Image (cartoon, rainbow, N blue to C red):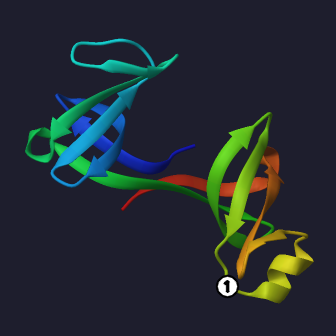
């Protein structure tokens, strides 16, 4: 499940982080021009003009008939954030108020429908 920036560079997609005129791209193994930032995480800093495409990817779904953003996945469960904008509905779903007006919870993957990746 992806939720964040993605850059296409030399025909391949990388997790990315824009930084002014630069774009940081990441991969889990060593590679040409990549430096280790921690075990299993390597970064390469590129000029933004060298990147073929930069986009934001967000995974969305429907759970119990309501719209959600997928924030993560663990052991057959999805960490979801409600995007319907109705506090009573969020509370009825048993979601926790993560921040003012922001409701999150865990949904079983088997109960989720319309799971899709959106490129913004």
Res. 14 image quadrant:
top left
Residue at the limit of the structure toward the front, as seen here = 37
Res. 86 image quadrant:
bottom right
Residue 36 lies left or right of residue 63; in this view the side is left
Q: Is residue 11 above or below residue 80?
A: above
Residue 16 lies left or right of residue 33; in this view the side is right
Q: Residues within 10 Å of mark 1 (few under 14, many from 20)?
A: few
Report x, y in % for residue 118: 44, 57
Residue under label 1, please give it. 85
- Residue at the image point whose x is 80% and y is 60% from the top: 105
- Residue at the image point whose x is 32% and y is 19% from the top: 35
Name the one closer to the observer, 24 or 7.
24
Name the one closer to the observer, 114 or 39.
39
Residue at the limit of the structure toward the left, as seen here = 49
Report x, y in % for residue 26: 37, 30
Numbered disc total: 1
Q: Is residue 76 above or below residue 118?
A: above
Residue 35 lies left or right of residue 28; in this view the side is left
The quadrant of the image that shows the N terminus is: top right
Res. 45 image quadrant:
top left
- Residue at the image point whose x is 84% and y is 87% from the top: 88
Residue 96 lies left or right of residue 112; in this view the side is right
Q: Is residue 76 above or below residue 113?
A: above
- Residue at the image point whose x is 36% and y is 62% from the top: 120
Report x, y in % for residue 91: 88, 79
Report x, y in % for residue 113: 69, 57
Name the one closer to the observer, 70 or 41.
41
Tag 1 secondary structure: loop
Q: Is residue 90 above or below residue 31?
A: below
């Amino acid at each position: 499940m992806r939720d964040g920036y993605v850059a296409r560079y030399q025909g391949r997609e990388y997790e990315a982080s824009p930084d002014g005129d630069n774009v940081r791209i990441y991969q889990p193994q060593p590679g040409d021009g990549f430096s280790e930032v921690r075990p299993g995480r390597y970064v390469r800093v590129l000029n933004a003009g060298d990147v073929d495409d930069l986009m934001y990817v967000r995974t969305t779904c429907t759970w119990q008939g309501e719209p959600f953003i997928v924030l993560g996945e663990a052991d057959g469960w999805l960490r979801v954030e409600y995007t319907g904008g109705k506090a009573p509905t969020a509370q009825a779903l048993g979601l926790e108020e993560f921040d003012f007006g922001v409701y999150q919870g865990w949904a079983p993957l088997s109960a989720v429908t319309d799971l899709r990746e959106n490129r913004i």
